[in-house]
Image (cartoon, rainbow, N blue to C red):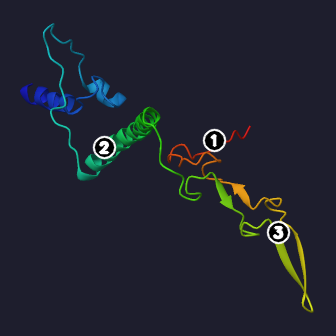
């Protein structure tokens, strides 16, 4: 009887996650036992982690941190930039708010050579004869916009 109880105990202790046997055949062999009131259930003592599992967990934690950190960083930069006064002059227009027309080079008149030595002068269609255009970078303010202020949000709906 001692040998049969040891073999049953070894069979029963091999299935530490489930208290019921995995097959009906084993259920017929093993007697039903009730645990004592203070009996402890078997525990997994150590988790076996290989290098790939550790790398996968690390990548997941870093991804979550970056996914939260980047938007928070941009929000704090936007808030800090709003608190500071911007006095940097616009680079393309040198702070004037206007750029020289590139077609008429600031003259307001375009000269076209027709051929056989004939020329024709007409009003510039790009600047309408003014010779300058509103700066597209600063929108005529003369102050260089901050990097985050240059973004244009378009509603696609």
Classify mark 2: residues with Cα within 10 Å, few (<14), some (14-19) or many (20+). Answer: few
The foreground one among 53 and 6 is: 53
Q: In the current view of this chain or complex, which residue is farthest to the front?
A: 107
The Cα–Cα distance between marks 1 and 3, rounded to whole angstroms, is 37 Å
Whole-percent x, y for residue 116 in the image: 92, 92
Whole-percent x, y for residue 24 in the image: 36, 28
- Quadrant in the picture for the N terminus: top left
Please give the residue where the numbered disc 2 appears in the rendered image. Answer: 57
The Cα–Cα distance between marks 3 and 2, rounded to whole angstroms, is 68 Å
Q: Earlier in the sequence, mark 3 or mark 2?
A: 2
The foreground one among 94 and 10 is: 94
**Which residue is rendered at x = 25% and y = 16% of the image?**
32
Q: In the current view of this chain or complex, which residue is farthest to the bottom?
A: 116
Whole-percent x, y for residue 120 in the image: 91, 78
Q: Which mark is residue 153?
A: 1
For numbered disc 2, what is the local secondary structure?
A: helix
Please give the residue where the numbered disc 3 appears in the rendered image. Answer: 109
**Which residue is rendered at x = 28% and y = 50% of the image?**
55
Position of residue 136 in the picture relative to residue 90 (left or right) = right
């Amino acid at each position: 009887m001692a040998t049969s109880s040891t073999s049953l105990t070894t069979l029963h202790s091999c299935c530490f996650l489930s208290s019921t046997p995995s097959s009906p055949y084993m259920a017929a062999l093993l007697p039903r036992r009730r645990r004592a009131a203070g009996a402890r259930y078997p525990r997994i003592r150590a988790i076996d982690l290989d290098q790939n599992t550790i790398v996968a967990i690390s990548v997941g934690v870093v991804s979550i941190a970056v996914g939260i950190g980047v938007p928070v960083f941009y929000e704090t930069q936007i808030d800090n930039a709003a608190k500071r006064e911007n006095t940097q002059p616009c680079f393309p227009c040198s702070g004037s708010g206007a750029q020289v027309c590139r077609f008429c080079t600031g003259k307001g008149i375009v000269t076209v050579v027709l051929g056989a030595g004939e020329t024709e002068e007409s009003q510039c269609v790009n600047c309408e004869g003014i010779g300058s255009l509103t700066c597209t970078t600063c929108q005529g303010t003369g102050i260089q916009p901050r990097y985050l202020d240059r973004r244009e949000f378009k509603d696609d709906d």
